[in-house]
Amino acid sequence: MSDRWLRRAYSILERHLGESVVTDRPLAKETTLRIGGPAAVFATADTFHHLRVVFETVVDYDLPWFVLGKGSNLLISDAGFDGVVVRLGRDFRRIEVSGSEIRAGGAMPLSMLVQAALKHALGGLAFAIGIPGTLGGGIAGNAGAHGGCLGDIVRSATVFLSKGELRSIDKSEMTFGYRESSLGQDEIIVEVSLGLRPADIDLVQMDMERFFRQRKETQPLHHPSAGSTFKNPPGDSAGRLIEEAGCKGLSIGGAKVSEQHANFIINTGGATALDIYALMLKVRRRVEEASGVLLEPEIRLLGAFSEELMETDHAR
Ligand SMILES: Cc1cc2nc3c(=O)[nH]c(=O)nc-3n(C[C@H](O)[C@H](O)[C@H](O)COP(=O)(O)OP(=O)(O)OC[C@H]3O[C@@H](n4cnc5c(N)ncnc54)[C@H](O)[C@@H]3O)c2cc1C
């Protein structure tokens, strides 16, 4: 950490958050791709008080910040992130089931929500089995699979605005599209209410098992990845286009287009962010040449990536 303001911000945060804030924390272990350089400052906000202190400080010092969930939809640059990475901790991992409503914190893993839905014989969330993210990350990107998505079942969300206020947002005020939501960049999702429906527990379990089996059969789950690399273009499948463009098995360094699912780029061991990014660009270019379709990334990028650099050196 070199920046003077970051150092000052760190010493304020350390006073309030103690060991929950550290400097120069490598982010690779915080992502499912197992890639990423350090965060200059990494803070785990276990309470609302912590969250308030973190954001008062980043706003006061005008620092770049990023909210991290499970890091399952992220490619973080090898140089890391020269700002404050915030992760929601303890108090944001609570869950309450009341009738057919599940109310949970933004840091709650989707896998635990799915299990809670099963335990209480609630239908409507089986699609989320095997999605390795948090509820907050899932709402931000409207995670979905098997024809379902979180946007379909959300009733309301409570967001913390980086300026320090809490706001409750009703479903009628939100819109959800394909892997996107209308929630703003500075809205941190701290709690969500999901509306499910009473169902036969055996049927819920059967759906979950079926969806999970499909995942195991079609996705390279034994290698680190960030899930689907590109969004499906309207009426088509990114995987099909990538396969047709002859990209299956293509690799750069430790990054490889999965043989099992062409829309997954896997880390075969020791891949850098540059490898993954270069391979994304190469695949995108080949698909455009082969089909005229310009794929849009589904994976979100954090940190510095230079497209020109890739186009000239690494991706050829
Ligand atoms: C093997 C595998 C399979 C996958 N399958 C699917 C799938 O079937 N369907 C699907 O949609 N996705 C899938 N994904 C991608 C990923 O799991 C989802 O996009 C997930 O919702 C990301 O959540 P996260 O907590 O990991 O978010 P992160 O990756 O940590 O962050 C993603 C974005 O969400 C934002 N964010 C995170 N938490 C919050 C918060 N509390 N408030 C506001 N913004 C927040 C971040 O700032 C970032 O912009 C898969 C990934 C893997 C590795």
Image: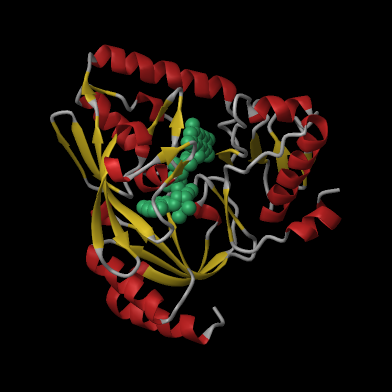
| Residue occupying image coordinates x 82% and y 36% | 289
Residue most extreme to the front: 172
Quarter assignment of residue 153: top left
How far across and down, in percent of the image, does residue 309 sit?
79, 60
How far across and down, in percent of the image, does residue 150 sit?
37, 35
Residue most extreme to the left: 99
| Residue occupying image coordinates x 28% and y 76% | 16
Q: In the figure, is residue 123 to the left or right of 142?
A: left
How far across and down, in percent of the image, does residue 60 sit?
38, 81
Q: Is residue 196 above or below residue 103?
A: above
How far across and down, in percent of the image, does residue 137 sit?
41, 47
Colouring scheme applied when the structure was drawn = secondary structure
Q: In the figure, is residue 200 to the left or right of 71?
A: left
Q: In the figure, is residue 134 to the left or right of 294?
A: left
| Residue occupying image coordinates x 70% and y 50% | 277
Nearest the camera: 131 or 254? Answer: 131
Q: In the figure, is residue 81 to the left or right of 304?
A: left
Q: Is residue 278 above or below residue 87?
A: above
Residue 254 seen from this side = no
| Residue occupying image coordinates x 74% and y 41% | 284
Q: How many marks?
A: 0
Residue 300 seen from this side = yes
Q: Quadrant of the N terminus?
A: bottom right
Q: Is residue 170 above or below residue 125?
A: below
Nearest the camera: 161 or 203? Answer: 161
